[in-house]
Structures are given as C-alpha cells and as structure tokens.
Image (tube, rainbow, N blue to C red):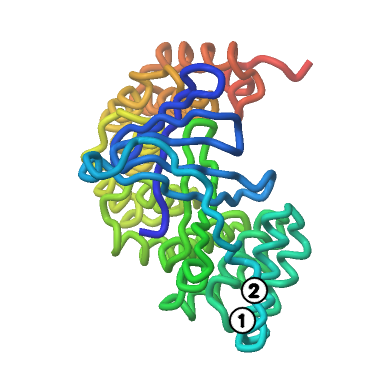
Amino acid sequence: MGYRFWRRTKVMPGVTLNWSLGGPSVSVGPRGAKLTFGKRGVRATAGIPGSGFFYTQKLTGGAHHAERRPLRAAPPSPTRDPLDLGFLQKLTTPQDEKDFVAGLKALAAGDEETALQSFSGSPHLADAMFLAGFLALKLDRLDEAESHFEQALALAGDLGALIAKYRMHMVYRMAVTDELVVHILPDREGVLLALVEIMQRDERWHEAEGYLHQLAAVAPDDPIVTLSLVEVMMAEPDAAKATREDVVRRTAEVDNQSTVDAALLLYKGRALRRLDMATAARDALTAGLRRTKDRPEALLHALRYERALAYEDLGQHSRSRQELEKLYAQAPDYEDVAQRLGVGGG
C-alpha cells in the first residue's frame, strides 16, 4: 500500500512508543531526527523542517538478521553523496532528471519554492510529480497539486523508481489527529490518497468518493481508507438510503480500540439514525463513547451530540437534554446545542 498507519504515544521527552500493523517500536531523539528500534531493525529518520517530508535510512535488519548484524549503527560511509552528480553523470543524465536532483537538494535544504519549481519542470517523471504535488498541497495550491498528482497517477508504474535510484527513501507524513499519522509512500495508492485529500478540501465529495472506492478495492479492510470513505459518503445530509446502508455494512464489525474506530462508530451511528434506526444508532454511539482517554475532544463532542439526537428520536427527552447539557458545559458554541437548550441569545 501507498501509506502506513501509525499511532504515537509519548512516553517521556524525546521517547515515543509507536503502534502500527507491523507491531510496536520505540523512537528516541529530538523532533526531526530520531532512531527507531523495532522488530524490523533500526532506522534513522531525519525530517525536513516544515515540509512534511522525511528521509529514512535502515541501519540494521530485523530479528531474522540478529545473529549476523550487531544492533548498532554502522559508522558513516565515506561514499559520495548520491545527489552530487559526477562529470560523466552530468553528461549522460537527461535535463529533467537533473532538475529532479536539483529539487531534491533544494528540498533537503528547506527551500520548498525552489524544490517545487524544479519538480514542476519535469512533468514526465512520476516521482517529480509526486513530490511537486505534496509541496503544492502543503502551500494550499490545490489546482496545481491536483494537476501534479493526476500526472503522477498516469505514470504510476514508475513511481518510486527515481527516488530509489538516488538512494532516497521519501515519505510524506500527513497528520490525521495529534495521535494519528499516515505515512504516504510514492506509489499509486499514495497518490490516490493525496487526491482524496484535495477533493475533500475542495468539497468535491463525489470525486473524492470515486478515488476512495479505488483505494477500498485494493485495501477493503484498511481502517484509514474505510474512515475516509464513510466520511465522504456521509458528507451530504441527504445521502441516499443505499449510501447510508453501505456505511453501516462497512462499519459493521468495528470495535472501539482506537481513535479511528471511534470515528467509524460516529459515522455508523449517524447512518443508522438517518435510516430511522435510533436504538441501533444509540448503541453504536455509546460504544464510541465507551473509551474517552486520548480521544480528540472534537470527536467526543460529535459522538455525544449525535447520541443526544438519537435519544430525542427515541422520545427520551430527558436523556437527550442531559447529553446536551454535558456538551454545553464543555463546548457551549458547538453546533446548535445552545439553541436546543434554550439558552443564549440575550
């Protein structure tokens, strides 16, 4: 897949516990420069400040290499920087590839505008379009980012090849919440996820749903894909009955083990309520509220608000008001809570 899902827990300053589908790992070091120890070995990570990109380098192998390699970083190699083209390379390297290398150097130096200009000048290079797309997205130039990503998608078979040629390991870090991070890799799935992000920012829900269905066909059990898809499917208040039923099917087996699960239960409850199944909606939302530690406040507010509406639909007006009062005490300006409680307005 073109992305990886991480949940991070800060243990102490400079030490982070990471949970992913591949198992736990521990990161040590200041922000932007860390060593990560896990069952796949030791990796060094250096971030490019503010860009969202970071480089990774594998220092040792995983457990199956343990007897052949010591668990320590090797001394720096004296080999030449792969981005410094030699005399013969300069003669034989195409100009658009030279521009790509210049873009990598500018990106490593933190000069995003120069990097974007260099990558944009190489429209026939998939990796250049991938990197240009994310830089434009970061600068909120959505039309430009979309154009670059569409070109990268057309060249998807070449994604990652040029980055690997110059011994780079480029990953884009997209924050979902303070605790959730998606690491997007240069391949077709990563580009599709980036296009979804653009469509969502631009409120082009139908197009976002189309890209997400492509992703869901590849990774039907991926929680991030499922969450993104049901979020888009429920973005329109008057979503079709078949759409609401599809949301319920996709969230049927969710158990509240993570923030993503809690968000999925929110959309499940919302879909059930709009299908006039208020009891089932209340139960799903209650499951979403069963664990509150380390959950984003905005998500908890949304779950409580939806449960208040479910209680109202069930005719349990007192329970509904209790929920709204709790929410008002925490976030008095949330949605129409004050109006429903008959407070405010002078």
Residue 48 location (% of width, % of height): 65, 48
Badge 1: residue crowd in 10 Å (few <14, some 14–19, many ≥20): few
Q: Residue at x 59, y 72 (%)?
A: 129
Instruction: Establish if 89 lies above or below 300.
Output: below
Please name whichever residue, 178 or 55, is drawn nearer the observer in this view of the structure: 55
Report the disc number at residue 85.
2
Q: Would you say residue 28 is visible in this rendering?
A: yes
The image shows residue 288 at horizontal and vertical percentages of 35, 26
User: Amino acid type of disc 2?
Assistant: Leu
Left or right, 307 with reference to 51? left
Quarter of the image for residue 293 reads top left
Q: Is 282 or 199 nearer to us in this picture?
A: 199
The reply to whether the C-beta atoms of the residues labelled 1 and 2 are less than 8 Å apart is yes
User: Mark 1: which amino acid?
Assistant: Gln
Name the one closer to the observer, 261 or 209.
261
* Residue 87 location (% of width, % of height): 67, 81
SS state under label 2:
loop
Question: Is the C terminus in the top left, top right, bottom left or bottom right quadrant?
Answer: top right
